[in-house]
Image (cartoon, grey):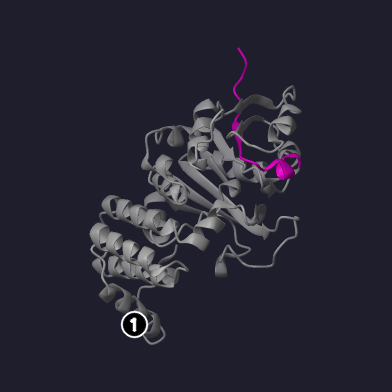
């Protein structure tokens, strides 16, 4: 009987033909070689199919799947790959991103050393459509930079980190346990377009431990076609933000009331600042009120909290609460 690989690498693609060869090459150059490669295409209209077919007979490639109709959700492709995977761990290597050759070697070693690992995340650098690397700090490690990897209880990580923000910004920089992910085959994250990853990582964290690796081994590409970029431009992701925060509050029994009000105030501020028309803004305010009972009083509290944090070092803020 054929031995299962330790890692399943899933490449979900939609119209990223221009990046596919470089992406797949960065996977095949990994120093850790005990992996299968699963290539998924969500009914691309460019030349993606021709490029993917070139790898049909590569010994690392176990599956190539082409959808006849676009799903409209990247997260449905994630789950399709997860259910096809045979490895103990999964790496969703987004089709437009890149990785250093020792990404798998580094993350696999840490996951194997910590038997309860649900998620292992490395640092990322931004690159543009031409592959130019940005100096922008998107990891915000602060004093953690350069230190040994941190291992956190997943429930604490969810409470102190993920409740405030999706610090796991890019799936391409994460190795996670397949067994835990397969349990989410009917999760609400599959119906989302913009914030499903945030909900997915939260649900994963609740099942085990989270490891942070304070090295940049992943390259996160930013370009106009990126779903996250479109979400920011149109403000369409905020409705899903509200849904995710509501879900978190339902599954984090130890949330302090003051912390909840601050989080709701941050959502109110995000709506206030989003570059959309006033009618859409009012719809989002109504949703925020209906789902989280948030008001402009929460916004004012959050603003005062920002000013007073300089006087009271014990005051809760997102940065101070982070593990």
Residue 143 x %, y %? 56, 69
Q: Residue at x 41, y 33 (%)?
A: 185
Check residue 7 for magenta coloring: yes
Above-or-below relation of 115 to 318:
above
Q: Which residue is mark 1?
A: 304
Q: Quadrant of residue 90?
A: top right
Above-or-below relation of 295 to 11:
below
The magenta span reads: 1-21
- Answer left or right for 34 relative to 232: right
Q: Residue at x 52, y 50 (%)?
A: 211
In-front residue for pair 262/283: 283
Q: Residue at x 69, y 38 (%)?
A: 46
Q: Residue at x 39, y 57 (%)?
A: 241
State the residue lying farthest toward the bottom.
311
Residue 306 x %, y %? 39, 80
In-front residue for pair 97/225: 225
- Answer left or right for 223 relative to 258: right
Residue 319 x %, y %? 45, 70
Question: How many residues crowd around disc 1 within 10 Å: few (fewer than 14), some, or many (20 or more)?
Answer: few
Residue 78 visible at all: yes
Marks counted in the figure total 1
Residue 199 x %, y %? 41, 48
State the residue lying farthest toward the top.
1
Above-or-below relation of 119 to 134:
above
Residue 255 visible at all: no
Above-or-below relation of 12 to 295:
above
Q: Quadrant of residue 104?
A: top right
In-front residue for pair 98/214: 98
In-front residue for pair 107/223: 223
């Amino acid at each position: 009987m054929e031995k299962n690989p330790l890692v399943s690498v899933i490449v979900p693609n939609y119209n990223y033909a221009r990046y596919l060869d470089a992406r797949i090459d960065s996977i095949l150059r990994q120093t850790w070689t005990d992996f299968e490669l699963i290539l998924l295409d969500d009914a691309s209209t460019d030349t993606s199919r021709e490029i993917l077919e070139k790898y049909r007979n590569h010994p690392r490639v176990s599956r190539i799947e082409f959808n006849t109709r676009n799903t409209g959700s990247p997260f449905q492709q994630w789950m399709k790959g997860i259910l096809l995977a045979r490895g103990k761990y999964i790496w969703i290597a987004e089709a437009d991103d890149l990785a250093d050759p020792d990404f798998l070697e580094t993350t696999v070693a840490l996951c194997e050393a910590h038997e309860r690992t649900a998620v292992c995340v490395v640092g990322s650098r931004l690159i543009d459509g031409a592959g130019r690397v940005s100096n922008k700090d998107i990891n915000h490690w602060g004093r953690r930079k350069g230190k040994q990897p941190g291992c956190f209880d997943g429930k604490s990580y969810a409470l102190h980190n993920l409740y405030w923000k999706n610090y796991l910004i890019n799936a391409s920089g994460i190795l996670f346990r397949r067994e835990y992910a397969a349990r989410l085959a009917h999760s609400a994250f599959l119906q989302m377009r913009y914030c499903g990853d945030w909900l997915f990582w939260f649900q994963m964290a609740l099942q085990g431990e989270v490891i942070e690796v304070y090295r940049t081994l992943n390259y996160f590409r930013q370009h106009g076609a990126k779903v996250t970029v479109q979400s920011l431009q149109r403000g369409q992701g905020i409705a899903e933000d509200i849904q995710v925060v509501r879900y978190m509050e339902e599954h984090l029994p130890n949330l302090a009331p003051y912390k909840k009000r601050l989080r709701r105030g941050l959502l109110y501020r995000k709506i206030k600042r989003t570059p959309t028309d006033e009618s859409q803004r009012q719809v989002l305010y109504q949703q925020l009120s209906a789902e989280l009972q948030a008001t402009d009083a929460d916004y004012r509290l959050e603003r005062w909290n920002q000013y007073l944090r300089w006087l009271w070092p014990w005051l809760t803020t997102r940065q101070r609460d982070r593990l």
